[in-house]
Image (tube, rainbow, N blue to C red):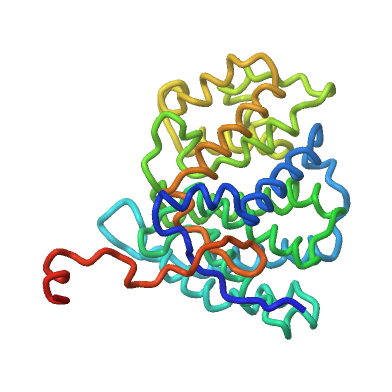
Amino acid sequence: TMAFKVPTKRIANPMHLNLWLKSHAFASLMGFISNINDTIQGCAVSAAPPPTDATKGVLRMLDILDELADATPRVEQSSRFGNPGFKVWCGKMEQDSVKLVETLLTEELRKGGAAEEIAGYLRDSFGNSTRVDYGSGHELAFMAFLCCLALVGVLKEDDVKAMGLLIFARYLDLVRKIQRKYTLEPAGSHGVWGLDDHQFLPYLFGSSQLMSSNTDLLPSDIPSEARAAEEAKENLFFGAINHIFQVKSGPFFEHSQYLYNMSEVPSWKKVNTGLKKMFEKEVMSKFPVIQHFLFGSLLKIDLPEIQPRTLLPTPKEALKHD
């Protein structure tokens, strides 16, 4: 049996990035995300196979968290951004997280403490309750959550298509609702590479869905509000574009420059290949994202836990120690 443990941060400084890129955790996650990307190639959302009991369990868990958001109002405040109601929702979600994960596990895994480890990733999947923001690191934590469920054998090979087309799509509905309801800030500064304020993976997975001979959609349709509205339910890429049209105003090429440039790429295959490289470089290899990542017995790295004291003392403190 495995010795599960509550996952912790290990990446203390940019020098650790090389160890991360060579780690078991990096290989597992990249492989997991690539597998979903490849498996949903050419598939519309409605072409997803009927969900297994395991997939249904994860969908039900997301429904429960969605109901929790309905039951947690915004807090009246003068600031437009970062509504404190989000902290209340996060508190409830964190409190329920282990119990929610336990509903997905076998009795043996529950007894072994797997829920305590896997719930760590779930708690990081919806944004940061202190900064009231959400970014690609939170999206990555949700993929790590699913990856852990696969590593312990709860989600299996026949769930892979559903992970992309059903589970991830359901997750996106939930985080978009939370982002809107509590006006979450984008996490981190997005240079020109930011695809949109919050997400990355719908573009990767959605472009793979479009690598098919039975679609008339082309990358040149990316800036089309009408096409986005038509395709939003069936395709993750255009679902994300449709969401942008709902939350942003003004010319598309101004607020979504990177996506606008992508509309000149000749094929979805080229879009997908480019996005995969970009994901590895701009999300998986960036210290500001990865410094928050958690490691345990399932997603491993050869680094010790960060101790609170590893922060360098201020000059004043340093003098006290003499």
Where residue 271 sits: x, y (%)? 64, 25
| Quarter containing the N terminus | bottom right
Where residue 64 sits: x, y (%)? 64, 68
Name, please, the residue furthest toward the bottom. Answer: 111
Residue nearest the observer in this picture, 180 or 203: 203
Instruction: Tell me what residue is drawn at x 79 percent, y 51 percent.
Output: 162
Numbered label tally: 0
Where residue 30 sits: x, y (%)? 66, 46
Where residue 69 sits: x, y (%)? 53, 65
Instruction: Tell me what residue is drawn at x 80 percent, y 50 percent.
Output: 160
Depicted 64 relative to depicted 291: above or below? below
Q: Is residue 162 left or right of residue 238?
A: right
Does residue 126 appear in this view? yes
Does residue 180 appear in this view? no
Q: Is residue 190 left or right of residue 273?
A: left
Instruction: Tell me what residue is drawn at x 44 percent, y 34 percent.
Output: 248
Q: Is residue 169 left or right of residue 305?
A: right
Depicted 156 relative to depicted 47: above or below? below
Residue nearest the observer in this picture, 24 or 5: 24
Instruction: Tell me what residue is drawn at x 41 percent, y 64 percent.
Output: 129
Name, please, the residue furthest toward the front. Answer: 322
Depicted 3 relative to depicted 126: above or below? below
Residue nearest the observer in this picture, 27 or 126: 27
Q: Could you say which quadrant of the image residue 57 lies in?
A: bottom right
| Quarter containing the C terminus | bottom left
Q: Could you say which quadrant of the image residue 297 lies in?
A: bottom right
Residue nearest the observer in this picture, 176 or 138: 138
